Image: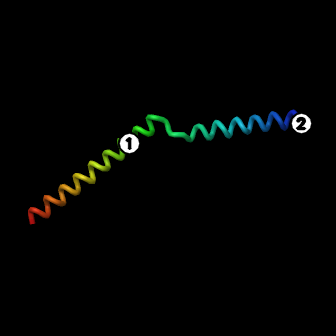
Amino acid sequence: MKLNKIILTALLSAFLLTGLSACEKGPAEKAGKAIDDAASDVADSADDAADAVKEKME
């Protein structure tokens, strides 16, 4: 009975550790996020430039 508890505890610990390590972001995920952020910044800058040109035209 005691051996079963030890084995069960070890298995549960292994599953929890595996689950936690799977939540970490890898390098590809971080690079994708950086690309998305850069594209968003470019789009915002383009909108600002378009607004500035529109104001000058008025």
The structure residue drawn at horizontal position 54% and vertical position 40%, both measured from the top left corner, is: 24
Q: Amino acid at mark 1?
A: Ala
Q: Quadrant of the N terminus?
A: top right
Q: How many marks?
A: 2
Residue at image mark 1:
34
Residue 23 lies, in percent from the top left, at 56, 41
The structure residue drawn at horizontal position 40% and vertical position 38%, both measured from the top left corner, is: 31
Q: Quadrant of the C terminus?
A: bottom left
Residue 53 lies, in percent from the top left, at 13, 58
For the residues marked 2 and 1, what is the alpha-carbon distance in whole angstroms? 50 Å
Marks 2 and 1, the one that precedes in the sequence = 2
Crowd rating for badge 1 (residues with CA inside 10 Å; few <14, some 14–19, many 20+): few
Residue positioned most to the left? 57
Q: Amino acid at mark 2?
A: Lys
Is residue 36 placed above or below 56 in the rendered structure? above
Residue at image mark 2:
2
Q: Is residue 20 left or right of residue 44?
A: right
Residue 28 lies, in percent from the top left, at 44, 35
Q: Is residue 29 left or right of residue 39?
A: right
Viewer-proximal residue, 52 or 4?
52
Q: Is residue 21 left or right of residue 29?
A: right
The structure residue drawn at horizontal position 74% and vertical position 39%, both measured from the top left corner, is: 12
Q: Quadrant of residue 38?
A: top left
| Element type where label 1 sits in the image | helix
